Amino acid sequence: MATATVLVLTLLGALFLLTPAWLKALLTLLLIAAAYEWARLCGMQPLLYGLSTGIVFFLAPHDAAWFLIAAAFWVVVAPLWLAFGVAPAQKRMLALAGIVVLVPAGLAVLVLPAQLVLGVLALTWIADTAAYFVGIRYGRHKLAPSISPGKSREGALGGLAAVLVYAVAVSAAWQQAHWLLVLCAAAVLGVLSIVGDLFESAAKRQAAVKDSGALLPGHGGILDRIDSATSTLPIAAALAPWIIGK
């Protein structure tokens, strides 16, 4: 509980109080730590891979192309990859995937308004929490037993239902966007939050580890906490121009 509280307070302070330059510096450190963990999952040298990913992020232009690449990965590549299985022999592909997983998510935090970043993160938390409790109560059919045995189809549907309720509440209070666009975007993000979670779980399973790391006491590693955000934040950045007219 203490770790979660510190994480939330740190996030709020970073989003709303830091200048863009300091926020980018903090995100660079976060991505280096996350990439360090990803390297352990794909057999790369952790420090070299972490620093290389941090440099790519720090030097990357805030360009929409990154978000389109992320959209192609999460909408097409990752689901196909999950369907055919993430195998230990695919470590080089996983190493390349790590760049696509981490860099666009970090860039999305920089280009999106702080309120929207917080809103997307809240969506992932709501989806995950609702899926957990609905799954415990009503879960009968496994969603992806070979990847994450604890997840159920009923839980996933419960999470998506909670996301749609959240979207209705947001659209009622947010006058900048049409409610139907917000609802559709929330549905897409809700589905992709599941894909992001499953993809990291598949990467951990092929590496035969339970957690991506041990940096966060009682919470595993950085990747364990941002798995759904890596898939939802860049897609939100890609959809933002159509939703809020920017």
Image (cartoon, rainbow, N blue to C red):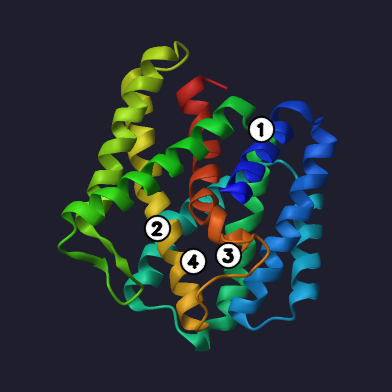
Q: Is residue 113 visible?
A: no
Which numbered disc, 2 or 4, marks the residue that appears first in the sequence? 2
Q: Say which of 68 and 43 sits in front.
A: 43
* For discs 2 and 1, the disc positioned in front in the rendered view: 1
Number of disc labels:
4
Look at the numbered disc 1 and give the secondary structure of its residue. helix
The residue beneath circle 2 is 195
Say what amino acid the circle numbered 4 marks: Glu
Q: Earlier in the sequence, mark 4 or mark 1?
A: 1
Q: Position of residue 99 (x, y in %)?
A: 64, 63
Taking the spot 73% from the left edge, 35% from the top edge, the residue there is: 14
Q: Label 1 belongs to which residue?
A: 12
> Residue at position x 24%, y 55% from top?
135
Callout 3: helix, strand or loop?
loop
Mark 3–mark 1 Cα distance, whole angstroms, equals 21 Å
Amino acid type for the residue under numbered disc 2: Val
Q: Residues within 10 Å of mark 3 (few under 14, many from 20)?
A: some
Look at the picture and state if 115 lies above or below 224.
Answer: above
Q: Residues within 10 Å of mark 4 (few under 14, many from 20)?
A: many
Using the rendered view, name the quadrant where residue 50 is placed. Answer: bottom right
**According to the image, label 4 marks what residue?**
200
Kindly report which numbered mark, 3 or 2, lies closer to the viewer in this rendering: 3
**Distance in Å between CA atoms under marks 3 and 2:** 20 Å
* SS at mark 2 in the image: helix
Amino acid residing under circle 1 = Leu
**Number of the front mark, 4 or 3:** 3
